[in-house]
């Protein structure tokens, strides 16, 4: 049975890879993933704010020494709260490449098409096999329209493709009026893969202090259907690869991701909960499923539950919505 998968130009033995997470902070974590048979590792992100602070002593154009911005700048993590400086991040990539043989995908995280992007070259020179760009941004200004944001993101992808020769994946959020069009534009700009989707880390409110509180909760598979839906809708309709991230909790969730059309399946929460050995369970479950269906190659299974051959996906989605509401007994 052939589970080999090509993602970002990398030939992988199977489609299960570790998503960006603290697993990659240290060499030991990446070694544990490799020993457990992980197909590739996405590193934790290096943030736009870290790079512009190190280079220009500014965050979002605000000089750290300027008293007018002190209240806003206080929202941001301090130097010591990041796992490394930008230079140390590049050195970490070089050290990983000397020590492990699984592919290393670096991660840049930001939202502006500005000079910080040139750091991608340093990551490529350090030996990263590919780059994942995470476009995490909450647009709060009511005067800024969606098209302006999308144009900026297309500019970022175009600029990165000009700067680097390694393949590029783009990790995005689902909150768009017409996400299919955004996916198409990012792919046309040169993205080799889209990573669907960022979780929206929503701030809670502490009633004791009446203040906002932030914390990371590990995911559950109630987050999976949103990803399955969009991958099923885009499969065969955008030329780039589709990576699924978010809500892959149980072994069958990996099978569902492939059936929807995912090229690879990224995992974080499940690996943090059960340890890297869970990757073996994911792989075995997929192999057993393929055997049960008498499918010899993963490509035959990929996209079986997608809307690739559906003449009118919008009508199908609208009809599914109506069926869903009528299904209540
Ligand atoms: C503790 C923690 C740290 C994370 N750090 C990053 C990061 O640096 N960059 C990034 O793009 N995603 C980061 N993520 C998000 C994951 O890569 C992933 O997209 C998300 O957790 C959904 O996948 P899951 O349901 O398998 O956990 C982090 C997630 C967790 C739980």
Image: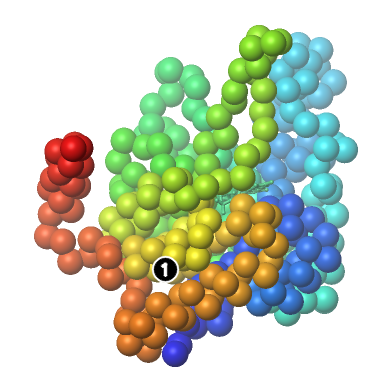
- Quarter of the picture containing the C terminus is top left
- Name the side, left or right, on which 35 lies relative to 20: right
Q: Is residue 261 visible?
A: no
Residue at 57% across / 72% down in the picture? 281
The answer to whether residue 139 is above or below residue 152 is above
Q: Is residue 305 visible?
A: yes
Work out whether residue 314 or residue 237 is closer to the camera in this orientation and state it: 314
Work out whether residue 177 or residue 160 is closer to the camera in this orientation and state it: 177
* Residue corresponding to mark 1: 255
- Quarter of the picture containing the N terminus is bottom left
Place of residue 60 in the rendered image (x, y in percent of width and height, measured from the top left): 67, 29
Place of residue 221 in the rendered image (x, y in percent of width and height, measured from the top left): 47, 50
Q: Secondary structure at mark 1?
A: helix
- Name the side, left or right, on which 126 lies relative to 283: right
- Density class for disc 1 (Cα within 10 Å; few <14, some 14-19, many ≥20) is many
Place of residue 141 in the rendered image (x, y in percent of width and height, measured from the top left): 48, 19
């Amino acid at each position: 049975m052939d589970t080999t998968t090509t993602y970002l130009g990398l030939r992988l033995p199977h489609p299960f890879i570790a998503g960006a997470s603290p697993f990659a902070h240290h060499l030991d974590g990446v070694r544990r993933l490799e020993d457990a048979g992980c197909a590739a590792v996405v590193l934790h992100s290096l943030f736009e704010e870290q790079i512009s602070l190190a280079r220009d002593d500014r965050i979002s154009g605000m000089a750290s020494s300027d008293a007018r911005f002190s209240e806003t700048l206080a929202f941001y993590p301090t130097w010591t709260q990041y796992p490394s400086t930008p230079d140390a991040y590049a050195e970490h990539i070089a050290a990983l490449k000397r020590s492990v043989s699984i592919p290393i995908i670096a991660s840049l995280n930001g939202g502006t098409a500005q000079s910080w992007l040139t750091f991608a070259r340093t990551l490529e020179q350090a030996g990263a096999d590919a780059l994942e760009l995470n476009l995490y941004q909450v647009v709060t200004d009511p005067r800024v329209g969606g098209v302006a944001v999308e144009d900026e993101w297309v500019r970022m992808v175009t600029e990165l493709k000009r700067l680097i020769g390694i393949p590029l994946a783009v990790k995005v959020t689902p909150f768009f009026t017409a996400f299919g069009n955004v996916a198409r534009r990012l792919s046309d700009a040169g993205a080799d893969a889209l990573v669907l989707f960022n979780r929206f880390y929503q701030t809670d409110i502490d009633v004791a202090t009446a203040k906002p509180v932030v914390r990371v909760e590990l995911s559950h598979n109630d987050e999976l259907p949103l990803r399955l839906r969009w991958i099923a809708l885009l499969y065969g309709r955008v030329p780039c690869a589709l990576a699924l991230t978010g809500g892959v909790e149980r072994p069958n969730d990996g099978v569902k991701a492939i059936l929807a059309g995912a090229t690879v399946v990224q995992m974080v929460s499940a690996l943090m909960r059960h340890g890297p050995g869970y990757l073996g369970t994911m792989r075995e479950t997929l192999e057993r499923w393929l055997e049960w269906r008498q499918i010899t190659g993963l490509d035959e299974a990929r996209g079986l539950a997608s809307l690739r051959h559906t003449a009118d996906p919008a009508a199908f989605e609208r009809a599914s919505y109506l069926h869903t509401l009528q299904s209540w007994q």
